[in-house]
Image: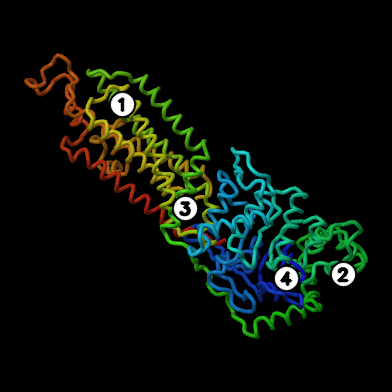
């Protein structure tokens, strides 16, 4: 949809892109400015693997029914297997085209805990050049807000499933505004009416129509628009099974199909009529068959009738005047020079530096944390309540044989609780996966900026604060070793366990699309780690061919460090002079004896080597998470 001076293609049927005949985004004869996007002989092939293990077979298919033509034009499709030309004003599309054009995805990917203005400020801060002053950026933001009619909700939160926010139409306009910040000449939209009622959808399309009259090329796909929306289209492109059925002025489409023998019934929506025709299931198709064959073959399977119909429509269009005019314009745009394969366009350019991106990502993530009480305040409240409950259960531990058991039990619980409470870290990269992919491809930030920004603003504070609160509550209620250094060592140990477990969660969750799968893998891993933590089984009695598993157990290192910190120098046989009687033949009387029975080194290195091991695990897991995020398939 565009003005009379700018044509855009509007895929309205199955958006398949196998060997699409030549077509262009400019059928009209006059231009007043703006960008002209044309695509020539687009073909897309995919490699499909089938079978198991050594019997797997690789087959190359020329047709994939879920291929989106819009992604191809917007440079967001994996270029492997893609051939043809996509030109901008007759010139090859630049490698960073995706960063210079606007792309509004079907599912609105905006931060719901932020206001409309804050989302636009984030887009402006990262996508506009640093040479622009803050005042100029704010002016651009206000201009976009006014242009899209978001004045009344500019300072309202967009909204999440827990927070009431703006309406569906205002949310869609916010997504469009995020892309208009850079003032792109071409704007792509993937089904912009998804999830909207007919009235709101009409309002959004009227907005796009008005924008096209202001000099922008608007290209979008849409699903079954109502007639008031269809009337806004300037150009129409119909595809079926990856082949071109029609491309030309939208208002001439009914006459074109009438010339092929398919007449639109009175009061029928033209958009629905076109879809019915190319899918072979409309009354017009049945009537046409009756005229041709004498009777309708109602019992004939659709699979046997659809393919000939598609071939017939494709051939008819190839001989039409619309195709000849389009071909002539394409030759004029390309200058007769054609490439066999689309050049690789995965290059991403950035308008800002790493530090600038890191600061803004951290700021947004921190605001999101504060604006999402289910993930921040609730976790702190649960930590406080749990600390009080544990303090009440193990209140004032005694220095007797029972005190040994109770101390070991509560220290084991503290360690495992830190592990399982860190499972929530899997959501850090999974929930925002779509948002990350969209913003990364659009050139908002680097992968490194996003990764370290999330660590600084979300992971570190949300694992540090609960550890400090939990230790402060339980330490004095339990009556643990009354030494200042012992208190801080325990706090540091619990923090290291939480960081290790959270890093492992990120390593497992990075690249995942479903939180439940990552959570299940984390839970299973921690269950096995608990077995080798040192409480449920004495690690010195484990058979050699399984004992090596203890070195991969996060709870083992945390539990060993807490035991070393608490038991060293303690006496659990009241009334017995442990100085003259260094050993007790009938029971464990000293903390040293207990540590030796657990195979824990009594030297200072026996304590700190656990922290070194946890630090190494943090580095390894975070490296795995970053690499998985870096090599994540970001193109559809």
Horizontal relation, residue 158 to residue 14: left or right: left
Sequence order check: which comes first, mark 2 or mark 1? 2
- Asked if disc 4 and disc 1 are in contact, CB closer than 8 Å, the reply is no
Sequence order check: which comes first, mark 4 or mark 1? 4
Residue 71 position within the rendered picture, expressed as x and y whole percent measured from the top left = 62, 64
Check residue 6 in the rendering and tell me which mark sits there, or answer none. Answer: 4
Neighbours of disc 4 within 10 Å: few (<14), some (14-19), many (20+): many
- Residue sitting farthest toward the left: 580
Residue 308 position within the rendered picture, expressed as x and y whole percent measured from the top left = 78, 69
Question: Mark 3 to mark 2: distance in Å?
Answer: 54 Å
Question: Mark 4 to mark 2: distance in Å?
Answer: 22 Å
Quarter placement of the C terminus: bottom right
Q: Is residue 312 above or below residue 511?
A: below
Residue 565 position within the rendered picture, expressed as x and y whole percent measured from the top left = 23, 32
Between tags 4 and 2, which lies in front?
4
Neighbours of disc 3 within 10 Å: few (<14), some (14-19), many (20+): many
Residue on which the image places disc 2:
255
Sequence order check: which comes first, mark 3 or mark 2? 2
Residue on which the image places disc 3:
360
Between tags 3 and 4, which lies in front?
3
Helix, strand, or loop for circle 2?
A: helix
Residue toward you, 577 or 539: 577
Between tags 3 and 2, which lies in front?
3
Q: Is residue 499 above or below residue 20?
A: above
Check residue 475 in the rendering and tell me which mark sits there, or answer none. Answer: 1
Residue toward you, 422 or 99: 99
């Amino acid at each position: 949809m565009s003005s009379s001076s700018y044509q855009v293609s509007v895929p309205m049927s199955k958006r398949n892109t196998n060997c699409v005949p030549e077509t262009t985004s400019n059928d009209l004869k006059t231009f007043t400015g703006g960008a002209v996007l044309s695509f020539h002989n687009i073909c897309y092939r995919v490699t499909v693997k089938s079978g198991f293990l050594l019997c797997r077979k690789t087959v190359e298919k020329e047709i994939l029914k879920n291929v989106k033509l819009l992604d191809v034009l917007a440079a967001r499709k994996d270029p492997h297997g893609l051939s043809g030309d996509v030109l901008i004003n007759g010139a090859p599309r630049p490698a960073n085209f995706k960063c210079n054009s606007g792309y509004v995805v079907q599912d609105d990917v905006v931060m719901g805990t932020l206001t409309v203005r804050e989302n636009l400020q984030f887009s402006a801060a990262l996508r506009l050049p640093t040479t622009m002053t803050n005042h100029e950026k704010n002016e651009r933001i206000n201009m976009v807000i006014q242009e899209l009619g978001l004045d009344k909700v500019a300072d309202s939160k967009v909204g999440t499933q827990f927070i009431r926010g703006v309406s569906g139409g205002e949310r869609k306009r916010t997504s469009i505004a995020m892309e208009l910040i850079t003032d792109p000449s071409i704007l792509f939209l993937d089904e912009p009416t998804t999830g909207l009622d007919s009235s709101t959808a009409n309002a959004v399309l009227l907005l796009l129509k008005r924008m096209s009259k202001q000099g922008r090329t608007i290209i979008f796909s849409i699903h079954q628009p109502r007639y008031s929306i269809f009337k806004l289209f300037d150009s129409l492109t119909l595809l079926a099974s990856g082949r071109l059925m029609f491309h030309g002025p939208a208002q001439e489409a009914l006459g074109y199909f009438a010339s092929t023998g398919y007449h639109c019934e009175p009061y029928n929506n033209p958009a629905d009529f076109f879809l019915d025709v190319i899918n072979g299931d409309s009354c017009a198709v049945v009537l046409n068959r009756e005229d041709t064959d004498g009777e309708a073959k109602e019992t004939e399977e659709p699979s046997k009738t659809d393919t000939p119909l598609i071939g017939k429509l494709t051939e008819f269009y190839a001989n039409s005047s619309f195709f000849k005019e389009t071909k002539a314009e394409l030759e004029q745009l390309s200058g007769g020079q054609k490439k066999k394969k689309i050049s690789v366009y995965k290059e991403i350019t950035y308008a800002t530096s790493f530090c600038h991106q890191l600061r803004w990502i951290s700021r947004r993530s921190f605001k999101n944390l504060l604006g999402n009480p289910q993930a921040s305040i609730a976790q702190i409240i649960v930590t406080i309540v749990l600390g009080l409950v544990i303090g009440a259960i193990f209140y004032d531990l005694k220095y007797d044989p029972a005190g040994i058991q109770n101390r070991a039990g509560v220290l084991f619980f503290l360690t495992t609780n830190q592990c399982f409470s860190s499972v929530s870290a899997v959501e850090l990269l999974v929930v925002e996966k779509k948002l990350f992919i969209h913003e990364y491809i659009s050139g908002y930030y680097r992968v490194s900026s996003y990764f370290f920004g999330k660590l600084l603003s979300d992971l570190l504070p949300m694992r540090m604060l609960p550890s400090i609160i939990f230790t402060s509550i339980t330490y004095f209620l339990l009556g643990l070793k009354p030494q200042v250094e012992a208190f801080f060592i325990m706090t540091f140990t619990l923090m290291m366990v939480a960081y290790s477990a959270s890093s492992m969660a990120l390593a497992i969750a990075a690249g995942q699309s479903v939180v439940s799968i990552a959570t299940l893998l984390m839970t299973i891993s921690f269950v096995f780690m608990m077995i080798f933590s040192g409480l449920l089984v004495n690690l010195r009695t484990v058979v050699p061919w399984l004992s090596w598993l203890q070195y991969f157990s996060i709870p083992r290192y945390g539990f060993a460090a807490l035991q070393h910190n608490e038991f060293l120098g303690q006496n659990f046989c009241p009334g017995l002079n442990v100085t003259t009687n260094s050993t007790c033949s009938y029971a464990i009387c000293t903390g040293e004896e207990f540590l030796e029975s657990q195979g824990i080194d009594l030297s200072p290195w026996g304590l700190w080597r656990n922290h070194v091991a946890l630090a190494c695990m943090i580095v390894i897991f975070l490296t795995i998470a970053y690499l998985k995020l870096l090599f994540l398939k970001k193109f559809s």
